Image: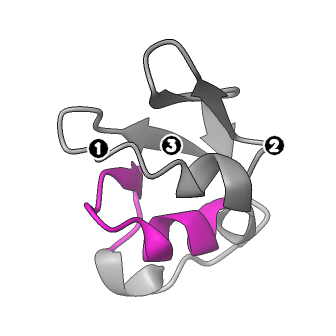
Amino acid sequence: MAPNNTDELHDVLLDLSRCNACSGCSEICPEVFGWDGDLERPYLTRQKATHDEVREAIALCPKRCISAEGWEEEDY
């Protein structure tokens, strides 16, 4: 089931226990994901984003550690 409104803001979830430190999310979507060089881990620069803003980062995450509240996996 696809989101009804792609402009609607949803909570972005980042599971660092699954992260392999590829830094792809911060490269693909720097407006939502930052990169902590000391910890070699991503962090959220903001908690909420639209489907369009983070769809590519979610889809390309090799460890599937990024998700958004209220979205089914096939929505990415």
* Residue at horizontal 47 percent and vertical 74 percent from the top: 60
Q: Which residue carries the number 2 mark?
A: 31
The span shown in magenta is 54-72
Mark nearer the N terminus (1 vs 2)? 1
* Neighbourhood count class around disc 2 (C-alpha, 10 Å): few under 14, some 14–19, many 20 upward: some
Q: Amino acid at mark 2?
A: Glu
Q: Does residue 11 sit above or below 29 in this rendering?
A: above
* Residue at horizontal 58 percent and vertical 21 percent from the top: 37
The answer to which of 74 and 32 lies nearer the viewer is 32
Question: Where is residue 42 drawn, in percent x and y?
Answer: 51, 33
Q: Amino acid at mark 3?
A: Val
Q: Residue furthest left?
A: 17
Q: Is residue 4 left or right of residue 2?
A: right
Q: Does residue 66 sit above or below 31 in this rendering?
A: below
Label at residue 38: none
Mark nearer the N terminus (3 vs 1)? 3
* Neighbourhood count class around disc 1 (C-alpha, 10 Å): few under 14, some 14–19, many 20 upward: some
Label at residue 19: 1
Q: Secondary structure at mark 2?
A: loop
Task: Give the Cα distance between marks 3 and 1.
Answer: 15 Å
Nearest to viewer (mark 3 / mark 1): 1
Task: Give the Cα distance between marks 1 and 2.
Answer: 19 Å
Mark nearer the N terminus (2 vs 3)? 3
Answer whether residue 76 is visible to the viewer in this image: yes
Question: Where is residue 28 drawn, in percent x and y?
Answer: 70, 62
Question: Where is residue 29 drawn, in percent x and y?
Answer: 72, 55
Q: Secondary structure at mark 3?
A: strand
Q: Which residue carries the number 3 mark?
A: 12
Q: Secondary structure at mark 1?
A: loop
Instruction: Find out whether residue 66 is within the magenta segment.
Output: yes
